[in-house]
Image: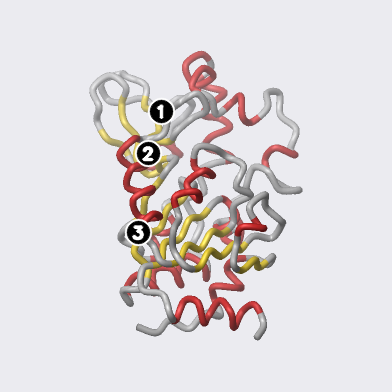
Amino acid sequence: MNKQEELQRMIDESQNIVFFGGAGVSTESNIPDFRSADGLYQEKYTYPPEQVVSHTFFAQKPELFYEFYKDKMMFLDAKPNKAHLKLAEMEAAGKLKAVITQNIDGLHQMAGSKNVLELHGSIHRNYCQECGKFYDAKYVKEAAGIPKCECGGTIKPDVVLYEEGLDNEVMRESIRAISEADMLIIGGTSLVVYPAAGFIDYFRGKHLVLINKSATSRDAQADLCIQEPIGEVLGKVVVRR
């Protein structure tokens, strides 16, 4: 039995699947990740990306923050790929109970997934720091310089910047979903960003699958490792109720 057939068998016999994904899930939608060979960390900027997307930098240099953020983190034309679509199909069939994502692009929801736990927030939610008024991603992307509220306040994206903590409720719900799952599929993440990478330790189910183009530190724990693009792998899965 090859790895694709093995994955199919595991999915067929599981009824409470949780998917945990990172930037690699969206690279097939042409959204760059941070850490791969052609990711954002390899490009040359005046300031390193992890400094630019920090809370301190946003507070002190909002104009430079937004210049980088709009150019390198907001991809409003991106469309869901085969991985997003297959996960939505699995949820609709009642097999997949939750998608836990480190991505901020909203592509899982665009594909039709309903129970999406966004660990790092979303570019699609933006709030005035003064009055709390909501603004969508289009408003922020098209604003000249620093996006401002009609009240004059600075708008901040609802994304978790470096130095900021994850949302406790989202973390609790993610841990609960993983601890109740009979199958955990981890895809498109190198499992180096904590605390999210530690969520795997709450899994007590039967099948742990890692799908990532490169090896991860947790490969030895997995029941199945597939080192291929996740869209290609999940795209071949047949969803049976």
Measure the C-alpha gap from mark 1 to mark 2: 8 Å
Measure the C-alpha gap from mark 3 to mark 1: 41 Å
Three-letter residue code for mark 2: Tyr
Three-letter residue code for mark 3: Glu
Mark 1 = which residue?
Answer: 147
- In the rendered image, the vertical position of residue 117 relative to residue 129, given as above or below: below
- Please identify, in this view, whether the residue under mark 2 or under mark 3 is nearer the observer: 3
Q: Secondary structure at mark 1?
A: loop
| Category of crowding for the residue at label 2, using alpha-carbon neighbours closer than 10 angstroms: few (below 14), some (14–19), many (at least 20) | few
Mark 2 = which residue?
Answer: 139
Three-letter residue code for mark 1: Pro
- Among numbered discs 3 and 1, the one appearing first in the sequence: 1
**Left or right of 33 on screen, residue 44:** right
- In the rendered image, the vertical position of residue 19 relative to residue 176, given as above or below: below
Q: Quadrant of the N terminus?
A: bottom right
Mark 3 = which residue?
Answer: 180
